[in-house]
Amino acid sequence: MTLFFERPEFGERAVLVTLKLQSESEPEDPREFEELVLSAGGDPVEVITGSRSAPHAKLFVGTGKLEEIAAAVNSHCAELVIFNHNLSPSQERNIEAELKCRVLDRTGLILDIFAQRARTHEGKLQVELAQLQHLSTRLVRGWTHLERQRGGIGMRGPGETQLESDRRMVRDRIKSIQSRLLKVRKQRAQGRRARVRAEVPAVSLVGYTNAGKSTLFNNLTQADVFVANQLFATLDPTMRKLEVPEQGEVVFADTVGFISHLPHRLVDAFRATLEEAANATLLLHVVDGAAEDRATNIKRVEEVLKEIDAHKLPTLMVYNKVDLLEDFSARIDRNAEGQPVAVWLSALKNEGLDLLLQAVAERLPGQFVHKTLRLKPDQGALRASLYSHKAVLDEQVDENGWINVEIKLSEIDFLRLIKSSGLNVDDLVTV
């Protein structure tokens, strides 16, 4: 089943429509809207703006504005009209009938971008679920044979309209995908429980789309997550383990970027992905530090975090792209108690990443072991493990071959190393 119209080789010429509605508490951002269209592969040829007290029930815009849109479509030979608003199925059909071209609303546009970006099997399932849920209310627009009764040899009977058949097929497919995604959620929950049992902290990168999360993630963990200067470059969560100084092994997760008024269908469909953020030990809220609407983007991300019940988690602000600011260098901002609250860095230039790891180590909960062990000559395996974890601060060997090793590492890693060396804590001699 093809959920979207075939995509041409080159960008589709699109007329953009954005209205300022008095009934909206927070209007949509026209610049963000244009970036979304460009990210989808569209070619914006004209932007139609206007204002209304409330949307027109039948056409969303007034008849005069619709004529203006029609003139722009004819003038530019546009194939598509995209609204920076959510349209009802009937509004979408009515506008298409008047303009004689395809019409897409904001949710449909974002879904199309997601469909292009999904790379893993899980990501594709989540996108398909959101598409089907969106499509189920709009089936009537995609078919010309909806009222045809089933007929032919062996097919006669009470009959079922093609529309009813299509809707039933969509419902069955939605149930199938939801069942498979439920298994994914259970697998993720099992993985999280295993990390909790092993007491491995989890750090999730969240933030507004195109804030530089994936670039930061790649440079921190030496991963190869897809990076592009476009909205929603990352859809599928990627997880990597990283040794954090004075903390030990930490799991970092790169997550999907947020956007203003993220459609609820996408929040529901990507629940399994977003739960990685909701169940993190620490959130790194990555912000484009050079963006003019930085404060607004922070607010929008906080709204989505609240929607997935992650707004109360410990959060460290990370202001990225300081290389685009004048006379600015990497630094850590601390509160009155000396706790790190923000880190300013440039992921692209690799500036300030050491400060970020330092701040993460300070913000993560955990106890540290800082002591001097007196190791026997036959306890070399433990000594080698301590060195591999960069836990040795100083070492001295006495005349009898005993090794005095000053160490500092997380209690979790310390106990794990003792166990892997086949020893007990009671077997160790401290100075």
Image (cartoon, rainbow, N blue to C red):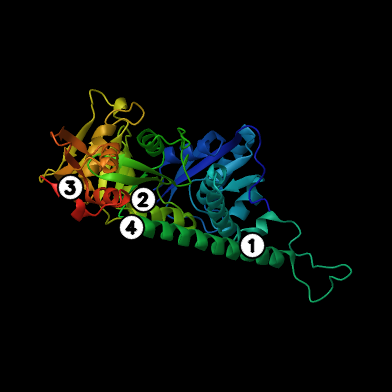
Q: How crowded is mark 2: few (under 14 residues within 10 Å), some or many (20 or more)?
A: few
Query: Which residue is identified by label 1?
Result: 170
Marks 4, 1: nearer the viewer: 4
Q: Tell me the distance, in whole angstroms, between the alpha carbons under discs 3 and 1.
A: 57 Å
Query: Which residue is identified by label 4?
Result: 196
Compare marks 4 and 2 and give the one earlier in the sequence: 2
Viewer-proximal residue among 226 and 10: 226
- Say if 400 sits above or below 366 in the image: above
User: Going by the image, does 215 lie left or right of 140?
Assistant: left
Q: Tell me the distance, in whole angstroms, between the alpha carbons under discs 4 and 1.
A: 38 Å
Compare marks 1 and 2 and give the one earlier in the sequence: 2
Q: Tell me the distance, in whole angstroms, between the alpha carbons under discs 3 and 2.
A: 50 Å
Q: Which amino acid does label 1 sit on?
A: Val
Label 4–label 1 contact, CB within 8 A: no
The single residue placed furthest to the bottom in the displayed view is 158
Q: Residues within 10 Å of mark 4 (few under 14, many from 20)?
A: few
Circle 2 sits in a helix, a strand or a loop, which is it? loop
Q: Is residue 373 visible to the viewer in this orientation of the structure?
A: yes
Query: Which residue is identified by label 3?
Result: 369
Question: Which residue is rendered at x = 58% and y = 65% of the image?
Answer: 175
Query: Which residue is identified by label 2?
Result: 26
Viewer-proximal residue among 189 and 135: 189
Q: What residue type is labelled 4?
A: Val
- Say if 193 sits above or below 368 in the image: below
Question: Which residue is rendered at x = 65% and y = 44% of the image?
Answer: 101
Q: What residue type is labelled 3?
A: Val
Q: Is residue 205 visible to the viewer in this orientation of the structure?
A: no
Compare marks 3 and 2 and give the one earlier in the sequence: 2
Circle 4 sits in a helix, a strand or a loop, which is it? helix
Q: Tell me the distance, in whole angstroms, between the alpha carbons under discs 4 and 2.
A: 39 Å
In the rendered image, residue 334, in percent from the top left (x then y), is placed at 15, 41
